Image (spheres, rainbow, N blue to C red):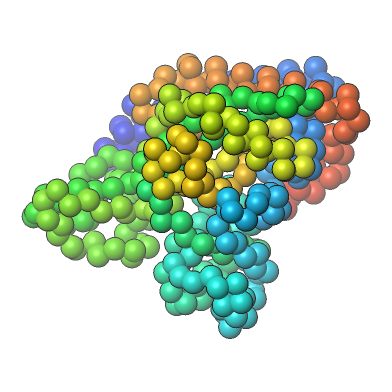
Amino acid sequence: YLSNFFTKLFHWEHWPTWIIYLPVFFYYLFLSLKARNFFFFTTANPEMEMGGLYNCSKYKQLKSIPPAFKPKTLYIKKHLPLRQVLNSLSEVNLDFPLIAKPDRGERGRDVSLILNPHHLKDYIADSNEDYLLQEFIDSPFEAGVFYYRYPGQASGVIPSLVAKSFLTVTGDGHSTIKELILQMPRARLVAIALLEKELFDAEEILPAGTKKILEPIGNHNRGTTFIDGNHLINRELLRFFDALSSQIPHFYYGRFDLKAPSEEEFNKAKGFKILEVNGVNAEPAHIYDPGAKLSKGIKTLLRHWEIIYTISRLNRLAGFKPVSFSRAWAHFIQWKTRQ
């Protein structure tokens, strides 16, 4: 526990979100006063619930993505019996392994790799909300591409690109996987959750040099390393996301989480599978690179809220209105009850 404390203390990427966002909150209040509306951000993406800040349906956004660029995905109502879920999977030729995730979840909450019907049965029993079953894309390259476009412009900007390195251990020929986990600061932070999942044999001894991915879900709070990939931004990527974003109704600001067969294919904007489309809640996640400075990260977040404000103002001038207090409060209550 003491070693985990010092790992978090000296690596701000692991700090509680509220500490990092405290200056951003005060800037948001300033922008709210400037806009004369606390929910000004909801017009940044007028078709997304709350602009995509919270309690937003993942499935609704994925429906706008052409089938060639997304995994097969099923929307499942909560408490639907296993037999009916399996029938639905069979109808669309979707087989295990699968990714299960809440339709309205954030930051990797309750996202699970489902290997077989037994795992699915357990997930259904534990889930108290509608969820998605998604084809597991076993591609080695995963990234988050941040994109925004000002209303009225044909082309946008990719200001942030994060590449994801999955939590992996390398065998030494004599240590068990559990022992290797406890030797790695990043793995040690999530050791309890890792070992509870039983996705691998904790007592297995890997041959020297053999690598094993411990967590296939690419979320920071699952142990994934976020790597600044801004050097990968190029014209091919921008052209692809200009075209893709234009197919999502009134989408101007957010992040596309995706997988690609390789970094080389990614650079050519080929082989993409879009896993999620995030709105105003999306972060320019490259700031969480282990070598990034806190001051630069906060400055980047402030800049992005300035962009949100500008897009929201332009859309408001075009006739879009922010949500009412009552609607925002109802969404907030629904969101909090799921946390």
Q: Is residue 38 left or right of residue 109?
A: right
At horizontal 61% and vertical 77% (from top left) the residue drawn is 91
Furthest residue in direction right, as rendered = 319
Q: Position of residue 185 (x, y in %)?
A: 27, 39
Q: Residue at x 39, y 38 (%)?
A: 264
Q: Quadrant of residue 92?
A: bottom right
Q: What's the residue at 75%, 21% (across, down)?
A: 310
Question: Image point 48% across, 65% down: which residue?
Answer: 98
Task: Tell me if residue 76 comes above or below residue 1 in the rendering.
Answer: below
**Is there any visible trace of residue 220 in the rendered image?**
no
Q: In this view of the protein, which residue sits in the foreground, 306 or 9?
A: 306
Q: From what the image shows, is residue 202 above or below residue 48?
A: below
In the picture, measured across the screen, residue 108 lies left or right of residue 197, that is right
- Tell me how many marks there are: 0
Residue 13 is situated, as x and y percent measured from the top left of the image, at 42, 31
Across and down, in percent, residue 326 comes to 86, 44
Judged from this view, the residue extending furthest toward the bottom is 83
Q: Nearer the viewer, residue 68 or 252?
A: 68
The single residue placed furthest to the left in the displayed view is 174
